[in-house]
Image: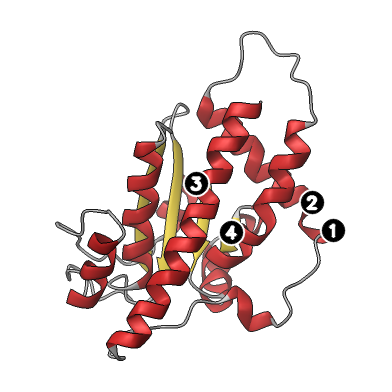
Amino acid sequence: MSSETFTVLVVCTGNICRSSVAERLLRSQSEALGLPVAVHSAGTQSMVGHDMTPEAAHLAEHYGADPLDHHSKQLTEQQILDADLILTATREHRSKVVSLHPKAARYTYTLNQFARLVPAAVEALSLVELVETPRPDLATQLRALVAEVTATRGFSPPPLHPDDDDIEDPYRQSTAVYARVGTVINTTVTRITQAFAAATSTR
């Protein structure tokens, strides 16, 4: 892991639907914004070496990302250690990440949870006047953003229902379910990358 690159790991079960789509969208949007973000994905019960499902590939392409050359991977402790931020599809996946490496609790969130918490952290950081010279690189600023989310998450109201922090599994479900999941992932990823951009431009 390069200190000049901010590394995100996205986790679901098989790494052929939710995490693969989120990975491609995060990568595409970060590149478009000029952010030094490296994005990877893995599954807690990965179908190792498999492509995205055709439906997931369609979602990635529909939202402007390249679905090609995805090969699913099994989640490992080393991937967790190498990440600056881990985003999971559900609270269960978050628990499995933390069970592999307990210290990862500081930087592991569900996608929906992080998207819910990060705007307040951006606002808090915008009020802080940096005294460092020269200005920190973008990756360092993004790590500061994650640290701010971690420090302030206890002050944020919980979701109306705990399940609101989870993204449903569309595997072997209807096209309508995939479409619904795609909308959620795109909305969530867009909110996160916009927060990344805001945090780096305001600091």
Looking at the image, which residue is at 78% across and 21% down?
129
Q: Is residue 155 above or below residue 112?
A: above
User: Circle 4 sits on which residue?
Assistant: 108
Q: Nearer the viewer, mark 2 or mark 3?
A: 3
User: Circle 1 sits on which residue?
Assistant: 155
User: Circle 3 sits on which residue?
Assistant: 193
Q: Is residue 42 above or below residue 175?
A: above
Q: Nearer the viewer, residue 68 or 2?
A: 68
Q: Which mark sits nearer the N-terminus, 2 or 3? A: 2
Q: Residue 7 in the image: state x and y as whole percent.
A: 44, 43
Helix, strand or loop at label 2? It is helix
Looking at the image, which residue is at 80% across and 31% down?
127
User: Circle 2 sits on which residue?
Assistant: 152
Looking at the image, which residue is at 41% across and 76% down?
181
Helix, strand or loop at label 4? It is strand
Image-based side of 4 in relation to 143, left or right: left
Q: CA distance from mark 4 to mark 2?
A: 14 Å
Quarter containing the C terminus: top right
Density class for disc 4 (Cα within 10 Å; few <14, some 14-19, many ≥20) is many
Q: Nearer the viewer, residue 195 or 142?
A: 195
Q: Are marks 2 and 3 in contact (CB under 8 Å)?
A: no
Q: Is residue 125 above or below residue 81?
A: above
Q: Nearer the viewer, mark 4 or mark 2?
A: 2
Q: Are marks 2 and 1 in contact (CB under 8 Å)?
A: yes
Helix, strand or loop at label 1? It is helix
Helix, strand or loop at label 3? It is helix
